Image (cartoon, rainbow, N blue to C red):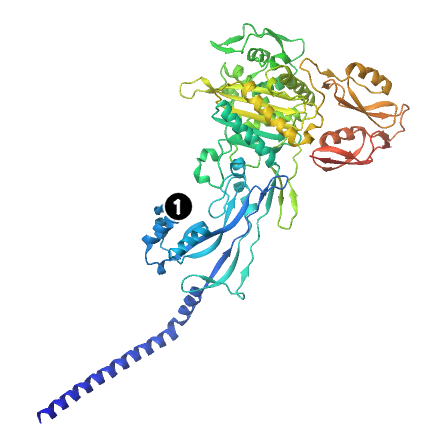
Amino acid sequence: MQNSSRSWIRGREERKRFVAFQIAIAVCALSLFSRLIWIQLYDGLGLSYYAEKGGKSRMVIPARRGTIYDKKGQPLSENLGDFVSLSVNRSQLLSPERLVSDLANVTGRANSYYQSHLSSKSNYITLARKVSHNQALKLKELGWGLIEKIDVKRGYPYRDIAGQILGFTDVDSRGISGLEYTFERVLKGEPGWRNVEVDVFGNPQIRQKLPYQPAIDGSDIVLTMDIAIQTILYDELCNAMEKYDAKAAHGIVLDPSTAQIIAMASLPSYDPNSPHLSSVKNQKNPIISDIYEPGSTFKLVTAAILLEKGLINKEILINTSPGYIKIYGHKINDTKNYGVLSFESSLVKSSNVAMIKFSQPLESREIYDGIKKFGLLDKTDIELPGETVGMLPDVKKWSGLTKPNVVIGQGVAVTILSMAMFYQMIANDGVLLKPSIIYGVKHADGSVDVADAQPGNQVLSDSTAHVLNRILNNVVNEGTGKRARIKGVNISGKTGTSQKPDFKNGGYTDDDYWASFVGYFPSEDPQCLIMIMLDEPKNGYHGGSVAAPVFKRVAQRLIELNPELKKGIIAVIDSSTREIQLPDYSNKTRKELENEFLICKFEPEYYGKGLIVVDQYPPAGVSVMPGSKVKFTMGPTESIAEGRIVVPVLRDLSIRDAIKKASSVGLSIRPKGSGRVYSQSLRAGAIVSAGDECEIVARQ
């Protein structure tokens, strides 16, 4: 009986538990059913949107960044694709501390770098960019399944040789400095996109049927620079810094007839492949961003103003004794007592005293306006970032010492490039051009848009330019620039030595100098201009003793590299020879010319079959050295019928000079190319109708 009662009680409890279990099941099923109805009726559209968004993503397709080439097609930049970016899905990350430690050990970056990345609130975190495949593989071997994407790194094969010109890009391939910055919009292209599906780990899964937009690659840039010449310049500046124990060294090479920059370098430099390893100061381009007091190279500016004002003639002589001059209690010295000097000899010997005395008739306003006119206080507008302007107090603020200081190149500050461009103007018959380092833009289809050449401004008369050219030639042959002489090459140039300002105590320092030399060659047909400046050289400090030899070494190597530079080079020049002013040979016969050439030792070239001279080049009044070539166009002795003309010699002239000469006789010109004329469609000496068209083809 008792056992039966116990069995009944136990059965009742089991039934209660079963009923409770059934009730619980029913409640759960009802809850799930109710939630399902709620989702279907109210949350369906929203959850569908989030599900679709979570399963798909838009992936950016990077555009290829354009390449920077030198003028001969040598790549100066490159896109290196053997790199990856590493990312992680935070929700899948179990040990952030260990990941930070492993990343730091493999990549060499500090732990704090990766800790700052992981502090982001985003769920999808990019940990590192531009990581090599070997480094990514090491992280895999350590057990990390990081998300990898192909990444492109910008490379510069010539490293620090052209770093300040090229600049560099940031981690996202955006231009930060140099040409990379200036031409960012041209180089970067337009990125594309692709819709991709994303798995639960955040990895993109590409499906062919999903929409996409291809990237548009950036355009390439072609420079006027020649990397071979850039390397020569850089190499010689390195040697100069070591030999003369200089603080810095700067150099520029350009074509004076076009103002195209062939080379531009400064030391100390930096490697754009690793810009973080150098100071920001070294990343600047001091040739355009820094100013300096030019010293005696600036005397040619004063000389140009004096000649343009008609204040100089051969009869004026200046006594420089006793080798110094006192102005308001300040003593300005020459290197020695030169005694009595003519205007030309004062520049050849670089006399401060003579230049100050020759400049006395000039008003301060005339000097200031002349300096402005020559562009020395303005930007040249070269296609490089960071260009600054020259400094000279407004003429109303000049003291009694300002004028004598400025005429000898002190108290005025300019950039190296603007000083070089002043000499470009002298070499280019007084026409000041805009310097350029961009030859053109090369598009993805292979077409090249060549940059338009700027016509320039005639800011100095050609007669003044010819006089200054002759003086500069004598500076090298007989004066302070002797150490720039090269056997068989006619060089025009000027030395400069200037004390650096003492900003702490006022005045100028006793031991710190800028030493410079700027010159071009051949003097009779300038094709190459080189400027060298050494900052605080210790083993010698005069421009003639430290900068001129650097110019010479660069010029010699350029002539060896480029035989074209030998065009126009005349026979060996003895320092005792003198230039001869060409007379007007119009209407002279060949026999009469040859009798005169026995005395003058000119080398004639004849064009046309006529009997008398109707045109000559160089023109009458120009001074040339014995042995120079003089070109003659020969015409008939009888008068030419009305409306008929004799075609002059246009070969070897600049396009500007060729158009000028052709227009003067009534000939129409159709130019092609750039540089100097090497062919003309109408034969020199031929008789044609006025207004006939002559096609001239020029090349660099």
Of residues 621 and 461, the one drawn nearer to the viewer in this rendering:
621
Residue 170 position in % (x across, y down): 47, 45
Residue 547 position in % (x across, y down): 55, 22
Which amino acid type is marked by label 1? Gly
Residue topped by disc 1? 108
The quarter of the picture where residue 678 lies is: top right
Judge whether 656 appears above or below 304 on screen: below
The quarter of the picture where residue 524 lies is: top right
Of residues 454 and 250, the one drawn nearer to the viewer in this rendering:
250
Taking the image as shown, residue 322 lies to the left or right of residue 55, namely right
Judge whether 42 appears above or below 654 on screen: below
- Judged from this view, the residue extending furthest toward the bottom is 1
> How many residues crowd mark 1 within 10 Å: few (<14), some (14–19), many (20+)?
few
Image quadrant occupied by the C terminus: top right
Asked if one can make out residue 312 in the rendered structure from this viewpoint, the answer is: yes
Taking the image as shown, residue 353 lies to the left or right of residue 601, namely left
Taking the image as shown, residue 50 lies to the left or right of residue 642, namely left
Judge whether 188 appears above or below 682 on screen: below
Residue 562 position in % (x across, y down): 66, 32
Tell me the element at label 1: loop
The quarter of the picture where residue 303 lies is: top right
Asked if one can make out residue 432 in the rendered structure from this viewpoint, the answer is: no
